[in-house]
Image (spheres, grey):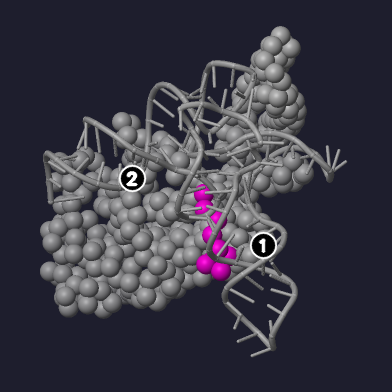
Amino acid sequence: MLDIKFIREDPAAAADRLALVGCDREQLTAVVELDARRRELIAAVEQMRADRKSRSKQIGAMSPGDEQEAAKASVREMGQEMGAAEKQLDEVTEHFESAMLELPNFPHEDVPVGEGEEQNVVLREEGARREFDFTPLPHWEIGEKLDIIDFDRGVKISGTRFYVLKGDGARLQRALISWMLDLHSREHGYSEVYPPAMVRGECLLGTGNLPKFGDNLYRDIEEDFWWVPTAEVPVTNMYRDEVLAADSLPIKHVAFTPCFRREKMSAGRDVRGIKRGHQFDKVEMVRFVHPDSSDAQLLELLGNAEEVSRRLGIPWRVIQMCTGDLSFVAAMKYDVEMWAPGCEEWLEVSSCSNFRDFQARRANIRFKAGKDKPALVHTLNGSGLALPRVLISVLETYQRADGTVDVPEVLQPYMGGQQLIS
RNA sequence: GGAGGGGUGGCCGAGUCUGGUUUAAGGCACCGGUCUUGAAAACCGGCGACCCGCAAGGGUCCGCGAGUUCGAAUCUCGCCCCCUCCGCCA
C-alpha cells in the first residue's frame, strides 16, 4: 500500500509515478477524493463523540428524576444523528481502503522506463555455455528415458500440469533443496524456517496477492485457507503487526515450501516438461531491513541467488525489469535466468524484489530504535531458487551422449556420493 | 469432534458478578536524574499505538465483529485464538 500522506501532498507527482507502471490517473483521483471526504467525516463524527461523552458523564452525576430523563432523551437523539454520520464514514472508509489496496507500488527512481518485457535490460551474462558434441535433449526426453519423470501418471493422478518425479529424479530434487538451504543458511547468513503452506486470507493481503490476484490461488472455502503461491507469503507474515527492535535488522530467513498456482492465464503455454506446473517446490529468501539499506540489500540478495548458478556450473543472466514489467508490489526487480541447452531457453529461476515499505504498510511490520517512533521496515525477497527449473537446467546441462546425467559436484555429497544418474 | 476454563498496554497482572471521576490499579522491563571512583541498590521523574488537526486540542484501541444503553473492559449474541481433560490421529 502506498503512503496516503504522500499522495495527498502531491497527487500530481504520485500520478506521474504510477503512470510509469500503467496505472490510470482516474484511479488516483478517486482515492484523493475519498480521502478528503473521509477526513471531513472523521472530524464531524469525532466532534459529536466528544459532545456525547461529556454529556453522558454529566448524566451520570445527576440525581435520578425528570431532569435526568430529559437529558437522556436529548443525548439519545444526538446519538442517532451520530450513528448516521458514522455509517457514512464507514462506507467512505471502506471504499477508500479498497481503492488504496488496488494501487500498485511506485517504481524505484532507478528503474529503467519501459512499456513491457521488450524494454527489460540484460545486465550481465555469466558462465560459459557447455559445448556439446551431440544434440542435447530437452529434459522431458531425458526424464522419460531415465524413468525419473513420469508425466502420464502425474496426469492420471491430478490432471494436466502435474508430474511424478521418480527415483534419482526425486532424489536429485531433494538434494538440490538441502544444498540450497545449507548454502543460504550457512554461508549467506539466513536463518532457516519451515512455515505453513496454507494461510489465512489476511496474509495474502499483506504481501499484495489479494485482493487483485486471487484467481491465481487455490483455496479451501470451508476453512478460509489459501495454499501459498510462494513461501514469501507465510514468511513475510511472520512479523505482521509487530514492532521489531532496530538492532535485530536485517532479519534474513530462508524457507523451503511447495508452491501452488492456478496458472489460469497461461493455459496452453509451456505445456511440455516440468517448467510450469500447478505445484512446485521453491527455496525462498526473505529480508526485513532498515529503509536506508534496502537498495544495497537487494544487490546482496541477488548475489545470493546468482551464487547457486555459479556453484552448479550453469550459465545464467541477470535481467532488470523495466517499469512496465514490474510486479504489482515491487519497486525494483531483477530476474535470474538459467540456461537450459536442451530446450534452448533461458529459464526464470529467481525473481529478486525490493518492495520498500509497500508490503510493510499492508502487513503493518515496523521497527523501532530507542525512543524513536516506530517506522515501517522494507521487505525484500527472491527465489533461491525455484526447483523444477533448476532441475531442468541440471539435467540438460549435465547430460551425456548415452542419455545418462552427471551429478554436479556440489550435489554429490547430498546424493550419498553418487556421481551419475543412469 | 465433546466438556470445561481463558484472551486486559513491551511482559506479568487487578478490574468484569454489582455499567459511570478507569484518564485501565500494582509490579516488571525500559529511559532520564539524584547518590557513587564506577556499577548495583535505593529514591525521584518519565514511559503505548493509531487517526483527525498548522496548532491548541480531540478521537479510537481491554482477542475480532455486531447489539443493548444517555454511557460498555464490564451486559447480550456471533466468530477467532489459547489452555485443561476426553475422543481421534501421522
- Residue nearest the viewer, comparing B1 with A336: B1
Label 1: chain letter: A
Query: As rendered, which of A47 and A20 lies closer to the eye?
Result: A47
Q: Quadrant of residue A169?
A: bottom left
Q: Residue at x 22, y 76 (%)?
A: A412
Q: For mark 1, what is the residue?
A: A371
Residue A339: name its quadrant: bottom left
Q: Earlier in the sequence, mark 1 or mark 2?
A: 2
Question: Three-letter amino acid code at disc 2?
Answer: Met
Q: Which residue is mark 2?
A: A198
Q: CA distance from mark 1 to mark 2?
A: 37 Å
Q: Is residue A395 left or right of residue B54?
A: left
Figure quadrant of the N terminus of chain A = top right
Which of the two discs, 1 and 2, sits closer to the camera? 1
Q: Is residue B39 above or below residue A318?
A: below
Q: Which residues are magenta?
A: A241-249
